[in-house]
Each structure stands twice: as C-alpha cells, then as structure tokens.
Image: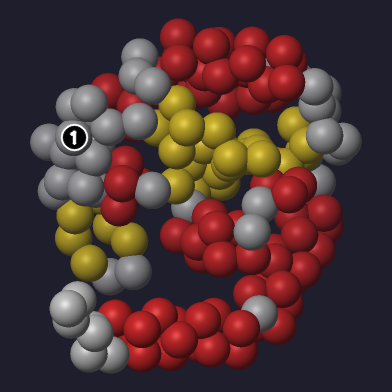
Amino acid sequence: MIDSRRGGRRSTGYTGPVVNRLDPIRRVLEARSDVRLAYLFGSLVRGEGRPNSDADIAVLFSGVPPTESLDRLVADLEAASGRGVDLVVLNDAPPLLAHEVVATGTCLVCRDEDERVRFVARTVSRYLDTAHLRRVQHAYLRERTEAPRARPR
C-alpha cells in the first residue's frame, strides 16, 4: 500500500499501479504539443481508488482537439497507466468540475507556470461566480425532495 500525505492527513488507500506509472503517463501527455496542463485527480489521488478504478485525467489543450485525437490520447493513456482512463477536457469543463481538478488534483504536466496560475485563477473565479447558482439549485432540489407527495386517487 502506498503512503501519501495530502492536507496533513495520512492516506493509505489503494492507489494501485497508476502511482508507479506516473512517468509513462507524463511522457504520453508531454509528447502532445497541444497539451498545456494535465492533472490526475479523483479517487486515485485521494487514496480511495480500487483495483478497477479509472484514472481521472484532466487536460487543458491549446485548442479543442478533434474527437479522433482525444480517442487516441485515451488509448495511449490507458496503455501507459494499465487501467481505464476518464479524460476531462478542461477547455470546456463545468466550473464545479474544473475547480475540483485544480483544488484536489496533482499536476502532471505544466508547460508554462504563468499559464497555469492564470488558468487556476480563472477557474476559481468562475467557481465563485457560480456559487450562488449552485446554492439556488441545491435549495430547489432539497425543497422538491422534501415536499410531501400527492397521493394518487
């Protein structure tokens, strides 16, 4: 089992062979000139992964690549990591997901530190700007689920 430290907490959850394969994953990502930033996030980073867990990888591209190119990248990442890969394109990711990636993920590739800082600042700003909408949506859903249901006659 792998021991990693995040946020002062000790995690001894299963991370599996993907942690030992970060260099091959990085090489796949770095071989693509259109990859500006890449993060590993999700259960494997939190130490909660299982042997059959996908590797969650988020990528910021210099432009939005064609679907065939993304399919090829996923296949290459799966071969490098030895497990399924769930690829998130950060260029058009929802604010909540992009925030989760930058707040909890591990940066695998960073071509330009200034660009990374600008991306993180934009992501946090979008996340905070949409916080009110998430609160309203959550309150509406809570109201709908807690409301008494009419009984059919």
Location of residue 119 with respect to 34 vertically, above or below: below
Residue 56 appears left or right of 43: right
Which image quarter is the N terminus in? top left
Which image quarter is the C terminus in? bottom left
Location of residue 76 with respect to 25 vertically, above or below: above
Could you classify mark 1 by the number of other residues whose Cα lies within 10 Å: few (under 14), some (14-19), or many (20 or more)?
A: few
Q: Residue at x 38, y 21 (%)?
A: 84
* Local secondary structure at mark 1: loop
What's the colour scheme? secondary structure
Residue 142 appears left or right of 129: left
Report the residue marked by disc 1: 50
Location of residue 56 with respect to 71 vertically, above or below: below
Residue 90, image x, y percentages = 68, 47
Q: Residue at x 74, y 55 (%)?
A: 116
Residue 73, image x, y percentages = 63, 17
Location of residue 104 with respect to 28 vertically, above or below: below
Q: Quadrant of residue 94?
A: bottom right
Q: Residue at x 70, y 66 (%)?
A: 123
Residue 3 visible, this orientation: no
Residue 84 appears left or right of 52: right
Residue 132 appears left or right of 57: right
The amino acid at mark 1 is Arg
Residue 134, image x, y percentages = 54, 80
Q: Residue furthest front?
A: 153
